[in-house]
Amino acid sequence: MNGSMGQRLRIDLTNRTYEIEKLPESYYKKWIGGRGMNSEVVYHESFQGMDPFDPDNPLCFGSGPLVGSFAPLSGRTTISTRSPMTCSNMGTGIHGHGDTNMGGGWGPMMKYAGFDQIIVKGKSEKPVYVFVDDNKIEFKDASHLWGIGTKKATMKILEELGDHDIRVALIGPAGEKLVRFACVMNSFSASGGRTGMGAVMGSKNLKAIAVRGTNPVKIAHPQEFMKASWALREKIHNSPSAIRRRAEGSLDLFDVGNAIGINAHKNCSTGYMKDIETLYGGMQWANEFLFRRKACWSCPVGCGRYTYIKEGKYAGFNCGGPEMESLCNLGPRIDSEDIAGVTVMCGIVNELGMDSVSAGAALSWTMEAFEKGYITEKDTDGLRLEWGDVDTSIKVLDMIAKREGFGDLLAEGNIRVAEKLGVGMDIVPHCRGLEHISVDPRVALGFSLGYAMSTRGSDHLKNYSCLEFPGCAKSRAYQVDEVLKPATAKKFWDNFPSQMTQIDTKPELCNWSEKNKCIADAVGCCCQAIGSWGGAGTWKEAYAPLLKLATGFDYNDDEIFKTAERIINIERAHWLRDGSAIQDDTHIDRYFDEPVAGGPHKGLKLDREQWAWAQQEYYALKNWDNFGFITDDKALDLDIPEIIPDMEKGKKIFSDWVIKTTA
Amino acid sequence: MQQNTQTKLIIVDPDKCTGCHSCEMACSIKHFEMCGTNYSRIRVHEFRDVNTFIPVMCQACEEPICFKVCPMNARVRLESGAMVTEDYICIGCKACIHACPFGAAIMNPVTSKTMSCDLCNDDELGPWCVKACTMQKALSYVRAGDASKARGREWAKSLTDDYKVPGTKEDDFGFSFNV
């Protein structure tokens, strides 16, 4: 097989057995790889109402056909499973699809070992780690690694196995304790953070998967592939946005973010933090803390940072990272101006193995709840969290990971905390139980619609409609005209640049950008190049030619685009099967009622009528029905007829819930 | 074995390496039309706990040990200065692999004989690893005589403060020297 390796590994932890499954070409044509293969497995091998901590819940690690090749940015791995973190508005016990994407170099090494995907099922009696050494799979005792942070545990595994080229994907103490937003780390500081994949790994008593491979990735048309790869590398390398990102890391987004007034601040409530760009800006940060850069596999950009704090309270602290979202969610989100302290917090969450977004959300929710008087020291065992209090925050992060005291409650995720305490549900900024990242959903309405429609709960990286931002649209005007219908494009440019805050063009833009992003995930490349800094162009310019040359398949662009749609629909079907439809495709009341508090978009809020219009418009573009269920026609068109009976069951759950709530 | 100042070699600045392994990908696809670290003649050794990455490849020594230990005289020097293995002479005894002090002689996974950097054999793009290392130029392809020049200049520059080399004070004159 070219591009892909043609087989996947199934691991059963209960019986400590494994099976190597050969896959036909038609399978790769249908699902491409990475996110596609994962979503297919997760949908078909889980069932409606399944508990994410059920041993049978399939935990999938998938890489795409371009992963581990000479194609630029090809180092991504998608991890998918039924998520313990996300939930429906119908109840926090109703779960759905969850996935996360990590960089580093674990995915390429898995491919060199000969597998496109590793599926882990079952539950080990004792802590275990798996060593995949080409075709040899070993189950090794991990009792001595239990409770140890990600960096130290990785070092121990590498020393134990005696080869520092081995890549290790593992969980920290948070994953072991089933913190619902625990992450999976690889290559020391590349994390698959969102939706709690680490918790599922922990529930299987699986500390780590170490991989070493000696096989090559074969390419169908090597000469043309080389030419296309060189061209794309050059293009990315020389793009102005990539040059900036190389120097500043993803922290370059702070000043852009604040200029257009979208940054999260104070629990995603204000939308603007004064002077964020001078406090957190990439150059300032780099001058003070950057030790050396690091990059994911085959990446000509290298936005990764490595921190070394030279002086002050935290002198000597060093860690991988931070990335913009980590810094923003642990900094401005809790209203802190202590950059060194926040950087240290980013290192700590990595070490403990937690999602920095949800961890920041847990802190900021508690702070706002204190401010509003929803909770008192009585609820938190005497702990008081005030805005910007880094010292206490560090303590609380540790408590969350170890599930001690109030941390035990916070480890359940904001929405469950609010549910259990009976207060503060109105200040949980979430969609489908997953907290928002650092873009305010009242301002950037494409992102906003994306959060709500995302197949893994609130997240910008599922529906990456960066073209709505004035800077992106201006520098890539031809893309706007290419992806939108002429009438919509006219509307877009007529209102430029204020179109960011207007919803009328957004359903169409989101419908396209969602598939654009999906293809990057499926082939295993970085989405940033076709998204936020856009140095590579769209999926059509960047990844489609490489995919065709690597695999040698004769599919055309339309078929690839349709595959992306199939992947999105099967993920959506996962939610619909559990009855989660239109009622979850929305935002909390706060964003409809409370305006943005400051910055260039002061006073802006979501409009219920417009939102309903956007929902319906979006469903229509997707050929879904009025409640957001996938129609039979659509399922047949996408060649996934097996979801039709499941849709019926989902509709039943949905209508029962509607009757119950309206009665 | 004549070395002159026109001979070029690849020099490494580990301080700039980000551990992206692009060089390995370029090397393997150039020589094998496949991608894989095991198929690469350049290897990036990682020390991720301190975020340090050091690429290692054949240094084309002046007195190559691989040449001395080879029982078949299969290690030959190309015009470019690179030391390579003649596959049809090599018997795959791996003596050079044992002997190389850098660990830069690597087993060819296809033939089980030895492979080492051939500087891409005068490819018009130059050595592919260097071209792929576009990020910060951790690798550069320079004339042997200039290999230490950049570092020398950097060091010398650090001394300019000590020696108080006078700069030009354009503002004092009210005009620019560059007009």
Image (tube, rainbow, N blue to C red):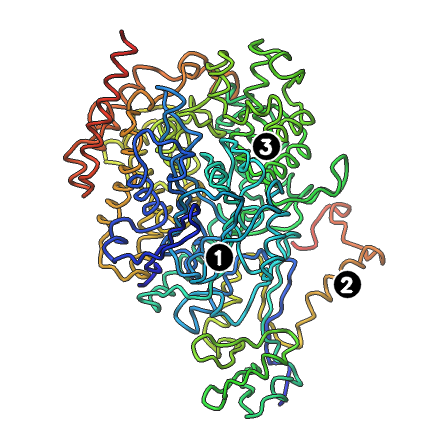
Q: In the visual, does A210 lie left or right of A397?
A: left
Q: In the visual, does A24 lie left or right of B98?
A: left
User: Is residue A482 something one can see in this rendering?
Assistant: no
In front here: A517 or A80? Answer: A80
Residue depicted at x 61% and y 34%: A280
User: Is residue A606 something one can see in this rendering?
Assistant: yes
Q: Tag 1, which chain?
A: A
Amino acid type at circle 2 is Ala
Residue carrying label 1:
A138
Amino acid type at circle 1 is Glu
In front here: A208 or A611? Answer: A208
Q: Tag 2, which chain?
A: B
> In which quadrant is the N terminus of chain A drawn?
bottom left
The local secondary structure at tag 3 comes to helix
Q: What is the crowding at mark 1: few (fewer than 14 residues within 10 Å), some, or many (at least 20)?
A: some
Q: In the visual, does B78 lie left or right of A451?
A: right
Q: Cα distance, mark 2 to mark 3?
A: 51 Å
Whole-percent x, y for residue A204 in the image: 47, 41
Whether tag 1 and tag 2 are in contact, CB under 8 A, the answer is no
Q: Cα distance, mark 1 to mark 2?
A: 54 Å
Residue carrying label 2:
B156
Image-quadrant location for residue A582: top left
Q: Tag 3, which chain?
A: A
Whole-percent x, y for residue B20 in the image: 53, 57
Residue carrying label 3:
A401
Q: Is residue A88 above or below residue A633?
A: above
